[in-house]
Image (cartoon, rainbow, N blue to C red):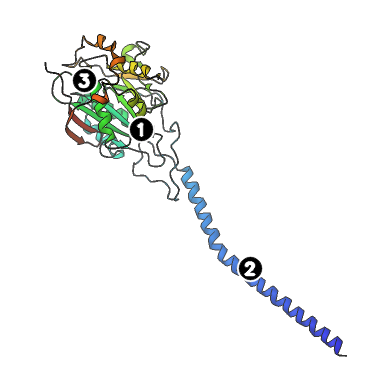
Amino acid sequence: MLKPVFKLLGLLLLFSLARFAVFLLYSKNSNLLFFAAPHNAVNTKNKASLNIEKTTAVPDFHQNRTATPATSGRPLEPCPNVSLNLQGVLHVEFRTNRTLEDVRQHVGPLLQQGGRYKPANCVAKQKVAIIIPFRNRYDHLSHWLHYLHPILIRQQLDYGVYVINQEGDGVFNRAKLMNIGHTEALKEYDYECFVFSDIDLVPLNDRNLYRCSDKPRHLSVAVDKFNFLLPYNNIFGGVTALSREQFLKVNGFSNTFWGWGGEDDDLYQRIVFRGMSISRPDSVIGRFKMIKHGRDLHNDPNPNNVQKLKETYYNIDRDGFSSLSYAVMERRKDLLYTFITVDVQPPAG
């Protein structure tokens, strides 16, 4: 009689244990679901933030420079190789009473002091210093800044504009001013690329990128003054771009071309003698408009330049950065540019 009773009690005990186990499992799953719900909600929110970040447009010229990227905690992605903000062919007009104050009102809100800009929502491909040799061309400067700042911003460059002003009325030395600009710009920022630009040249197409490539680059290929034709095959003047390594490899410009002409041809020869070649955009992308003007005083052609070009090979190592001497008289930070006045120590007479 007792044996059936024990069997019945055993079955009841097993049934009770099974029910207790089911209860514990249900309670555990309920707790897991409770704690998982907020976690899933956070993930959904993060995914929404990431989508917003990916679809946020890169600021164009008219957007505020203080715009900040999405705060996802992720580092900024590189800017595209070719900006989506570019317009292509541009209309450029110099026949206007444009002033520097007009330009400050036009582009100033987008810039940092010293003519500096960098994209807010991506990392620029290059850090570019724009070097302008200068003396008494303030009207030209207003036009150049009016057009170039919006172009450079649309190209999504991390850049600064340096106007290197030759003090006094002695004979002009464009090449030395550009060597000085390179040296002074590097004291402020770790620029990787240097664009050397005459103040009277404005591009007619913003797809002509003010950046450096694996070769020294000639940007001003087709200028209206020359009927948009290349004057000669070896020309390397107007607007050119060299990386820091390329410029150091040729020891910079010669410092000894006083007066007009010759220094660009000398630089071209330095490039060739150092085993490099130049690159150019095509004649559609590389179009420029020149501001018409007369020859500056104390910038007449130097009759010695022809002979000097025959000596480039022998002078390349001793004439350039290795022999550069000058004195900075004033450094002034404007919203549109960094203006550096220098004594280039011209020869007597």
The numbered dot on residue 28 is none
Question: Which residue is label 1 attached to?
Answer: 192
Q: Looking at the picture, does residue 145 appear above or below residue 228? A: below
Question: Which residue is label 3 attached to?
Answer: 173
Q: Say which amino acid is labelled 3.
A: Asn
Question: Which residue is label 2 attached to?
Answer: 29
Q: Say which amino acid is labelled 2.
A: Asn
Mark 1 closeness class: few <14, some 14–19, many ≥20 residues within 10 Å: some
Seen from the viewer's position, the closer of residues 204 and 241 is: 241
Q: 323 left or right of 123? A: left
Q: CA distance from mark 1 to mark 3?
A: 24 Å
Say which element carries label 1. loop
Residue 265 figure quarter: top left
Q: Quadrant of the C terminus?
A: top left
Mark 3 closeness class: few <14, some 14–19, many ≥20 residues within 10 Å: many
Callout in the foreground (1, 2)? 1
Say which element carries label 2. helix
Residue 195 figure quarter: top left
Seen from the viewer's position, the closer of residues 192 and 92 is: 192
Callout in the foreground (2, 3)? 3
Residue lying at the far right in this picture: please name it.
Answer: 1
N-terminal label among 2 and 3: 2
